Amino acid sequence: MTEVLFVLVPILLIGVGILVVKFDNILAAIVALAILSLLASLQFYIMQAPDVAITEAAIGAALTTAVYLLAMKAMSRKEADKIE
C-alpha cells in the first residue's frame, strides 16, 4: 500500500499544482492550493516526518487558505474582476 502512495501522491501533487496555475477563477485556485498543501502534508507523513506534516497542514492548508480568502473578501468587485 505504501508503495502505491509513494507513486500516487507525487503525481497528484504535480497535477494539482498545474491546476492551481491554470484556473481562471481565483476561488478555485485558492481551494486547489489548499488541496495541494494537504497533499504535501500527506507526502511528509508518508516520508515519516509527522511534525512537518502537522505544521504543513496547519500553516499551509488552514492558515494560508484563510488569509487568501479574507484578502479575496476584502477586495472590491472591480479589483477581483481585474485579477480574473
Image (spheres, grey):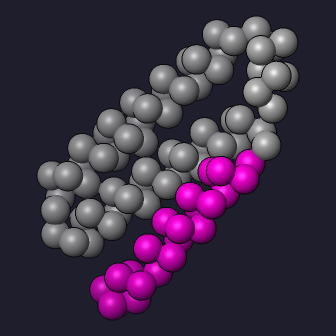
68 or 45, nearer to the observer: 68
Q: Position of residue 30 (x, y in %)?
A: 60, 39
Q: Quadrant of the C terminus?
A: top right
Residue pictured at 42% horizontal, 42% vertical: 61
* Rendered image quadrant of residue 45: bottom left
Q: Is residue 15 magenta?
A: yes
Left or right, 52 with reference to 5: left
Q: Position of residue 19 (x, y in %)?
A: 66, 57
Q: Position of residue 46 (x, y in %)?
A: 26, 72
71 or 58, nearer to the observer: 71
Residue pictured at 24% horizontal, 48% vertical: 54
Q: Using the image, determine if residue 46 lies above or below residue 74.
A: below
Residue pictured at 61% horizontal, 43% vertical: 31
Residue pictured at 38% horizontal, 59% vertical: 40
Left or right, 41 with reference to 24: left
Q: Is residue 70 magenta?
A: no
Q: How many numbered marks, from 0 up?
A: 0
Left or right, 56 with reference to 73: left
By secondary structure, the bulk of the magenta-drawn segment is best described as helix
Q: Position of residue 10 (x, y in %)?
A: 44, 73
Q: Using the image, determine if residue 53 lies above or below residue 12.
A: above
Magenta-highlighted residues? 1-23
* Rendered image quadrant of residue 1: bottom left
